[in-house]
Amino acid sequence: PNKTNVIITAFLYENCPIAQYMCGPLRETYRYFCDTLNQNFIFRGFSPNAFSTTGSLNDFMDKYDIPFSVTWDYNELNGSPGAYTQNYLPIVTPEVFIEKDGTLIYRGMIDNSYQALGDWSLPTEHYLKDVLMNIVNKEEIVYFETEAIGCFINY
């Protein structure tokens, strides 16, 4: 049982440069909260496209040192997105969803280092870390979202 009931779901695509870049902030966030602070947060990743394979995702996890599993979420039989993709309806990769006690509390960017495709700068907002820190500090959580920037998911 997860004491805090916090689930972080990240949609990633191994061939998306922005998703590749965001593996760093995702990895550091995971390590800080799960390893350093010993929080029992569940991180999971999904690739919602027809081009991924189990092998390509395993290579992706190894290359970018992703400390949680990234699973293919696409139904080959009928050529449609998998169950997680259909449930969350992400628009781009990367895009994160944070749930606490079964309620969605955040959807969007990991941080704001990308304001548009090709427009990178050092982040000034760390949305994923900030929401998780609010949970750790038992602060009031009010749902909000940001518009994630990344590679469009073709449904």
Image (cartoon, rainbow, N blue to C red):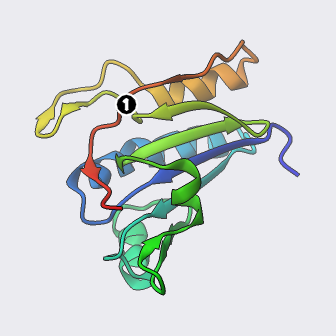
Give residue 97's quadrant in the image: top right
Along the viewing direction, whichever of 28 and 91 lies nearer the viewer: 91
Which residue is the extreme one toward the left?
Answer: 118
Q: Secondary structure at mark 1?
A: loop
Mark 1: few/some/many CA within 10 Å (<14, 14-19, 20+): many
Which residue is the extreme one toward the front?
Answer: 78
Residue drawn at x 58%, y 60% as measured from the top left: 84
Residue 55: % across, % down: 40, 84
Q: Amino acid at mark 1?
A: Asp
Residue drawn at x 79%, y 41% as measured from the top left: 5
Give residue 34's quadrant in the image: top right
Along the viewing direction, whichever of 37 and 143 lies nearer the viewer: 143
Residue 33: % across, % down: 62, 38
Residue 46: % across, % down: 49, 62
Label total for image: 1
Residue drawn at x 42%, y 62% as measured from the top left: 65
In the rendered view, tell whether residue 131 sits above or below residue 19.
above
In the rendered view, tell whether residue 43 sits above or below residue 99.
below
Residue tagged by mark 1? 111
Tell whether 39 sits left or right of 57.
right
On-image quarter of the C terminus: bottom left
Residue drawn at x 24%, y 65% as measured from the top left: 15
